[in-house]
Image (spheres, helix red, strand yellow):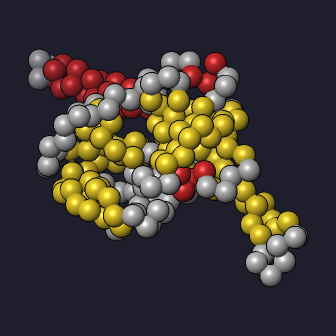
Amino acid sequence: LLWIFPLTLIMAGKVFAEKEYLLKVAQVRVTSYSYSINHPWQKGSAGKSFGSAVFIEGDRLLTNAHVVDSALRVDLRRVGSDTWYRASVEHVSEASNLALLKVPHEEFSIDAKPATLSSEVTFGSEVLVVGFPVGGDTVSVTKGVLSRTEETDYAYSAMTLLTYQIDAAINNGNSGGAVFSDDRLMGISFQAS
């Protein structure tokens, strides 16, 4: 019985830590229209795409620029909620494939935990990827390892910039989601190699 009690505390601590991560992310839903090059004057069909975002200081969220590219409307929802909140795109960095979002409704940010940026990343350290991959309505948490840093051609901007390579599972919809290491935000997931 004495062996079970410490194990229970360790497991409870792990569950608590993962719940803390869930307070730092949101799902992004983008409404856009497609247009035909042959008939640009005719409105195409409406489409929806999904991504992920992470809370940062100032009640703002960080996502990928390609997630909100060509958006007519951007909505966000928190983990465990069915309510979508309209968001505005405050800034886009095409070079780094990042976008800054703001939701003007105070109730959206209640209990949100802004991610603390990591200033130091160690190779081989465990990473946790939190996002909303396509194929479900719930958040996904996957684990992996930071395996290397290298210059990579960013598909969105066609620029060559530094990236971290990790081996955690990342799928469509994870774009804009958080990559944590030691409880700190070390990156934003954005493209598979």
Q: Position of residue 111 (x, y in %)?
A: 51, 18
The answer to which quarter of the image holds residue 162 is: bottom left
Task: Determine the residue located farthest toward the bottom in the rendered image.
Answer: 38
The residue at 66%/37% (across/down) is 88
Asked if residue 124 shows in the view, the reply is yes
Asked if residue 173 shows in the view, the reply is no
The residue at 44%/55% (across/down) is 95
The answer to which quarter of the image holds residue 17 is: top left
Q: Position of residue 193 (x, y in %)?
A: 34, 68
Q: Position of residue 74 (x, y in %)?
A: 67, 44
Q: Position of residue 92 (x, y in %)?
A: 54, 46
Depth check: give the residue in front, 127 or 9: 127
Task: Determine the residue located farthest toward the left in the rendered image.
Answer: 3
Task: Determine the residue located farthest toward the right in the rendered image.
Answer: 42
Residue 107 lies left or right of residue 179; in this view the side is right
The residue at 32%/58% (across/down) is 161
**Does residue 149 sit above or below 73 in this rendering?**
below
Depth check: give the residue in front, 63 or 127: 63
The residue at 80%/65% (across/down) is 45
Residue 150 lies left or right of residue 188; in this view the side is left
**Does residue 105 sit above or below 76 in this rendering?**
above
**Does residue 67 sit above or below 59 in this rendering?**
below
**Does residue 51 sit above or below 86 in this rendering?**
below
